[in-house]
Image: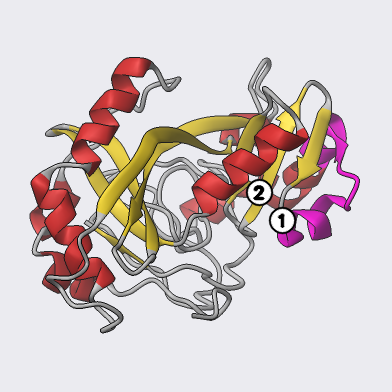
Amino acid sequence: MNRRASALVTATFAATLLGLAPQASAAPVPQPQSATAETRAAAHQAAAAPDSLATLSRFFSREGKVSLTAAQPRIEGDAIPVSYLSPDFVAGKAGAPVARLEFLASRAVASDGQQAALWTAKTAAGWQVVNIATGDDEFRYAQLGAAKLPGGTVFREPQIDAWYVAQGGSVLPLDEDAVRAVGAGGTTLAAYRARVVTAYGDKLPGSAYAKGGKAGGFAPTEAAAAAVPDAGPGAGPGGLPLAGGAVAGALALGAVGALGVRRVRRRGVRV
């Protein structure tokens, strides 16, 4: 599958495939500020639950690559924290880190080698799988970031689907989108802040952009909505609009605003 051409399936198809539409309306609760042994264990338990594995079997078999009974999905390794560019950082809030934790991800592998990331979050009903996305981006970039800047913070700028690792005063790119944004050699934290302020600073919650409805829906309790390729401006939950692949409704992701969605690179379903 061409990742650049991949699109999120619609919410209707997701509900049909997964049979889990009621979970999307679960009220979100504040996400943990850090990934502890307790939250990792809870996320892993949610990902490895029988219902989650049954859903994964349907997910992996949806295009006929493997049969429903032969998919035999398994969860590999521990759940990992996934952080996104922080709106507080863009807003210039004193002491705000460049990124904040949005969800935990667990790696799922099918018998034929297909991989997917299960996004898990704490809802009013407890820890649940709220999205399934193809591929291994979360895990691959976590590994790349650890190799580039051991101990650094790996994060995604979802508006342009760019991955970085930051530590101290440095921000280094981890993929081609990030290279286009900050150069192959990376940039300083101050310079990166200046770039994202220019790009998104006028689209923060409370801005005219947000109040005008151009940012899509910000209410964290809105029903989940699936993004489509080249969705245009907006299409984002949480604090500001963002590129496809975010968990809308089920999570108040608060990801920072986008000028527009260029492409959705991964196929996924929200549950």
Residue 60, percent across and down?
A: 27, 69
Instruction: Name above or below for residue 94 compared with residue 120.
Output: above
Residue 43 visible here = yes
Residue 182 covered by magenta stretch:
yes
- Give the position of the C terminus as an image quadrant: bottom left
Q: Residues within 10 Å of mark 1 (few under 14, many from 20)?
A: some
- Look at the numbered disc 1 and give the secondary structure of its residue: loop
**Magenta span:** 175-194
Identify the residue shown where x is 81% and y is 56%.
Answer: 179
Q: Which residue is mark 1?
A: 175
Q: Nearer the viewer, residue 41 or 178?
A: 41
Residue 86 x %, y %: 58, 35
Residue 225 vs residue 212: left or right? left
Q: Tell me the residue that label 2 is attached to.
A: 163
Q: Residue at x 29, y 74 (%)?
A: 10
| Residue kind at label 1, given as amino acid type | Asp
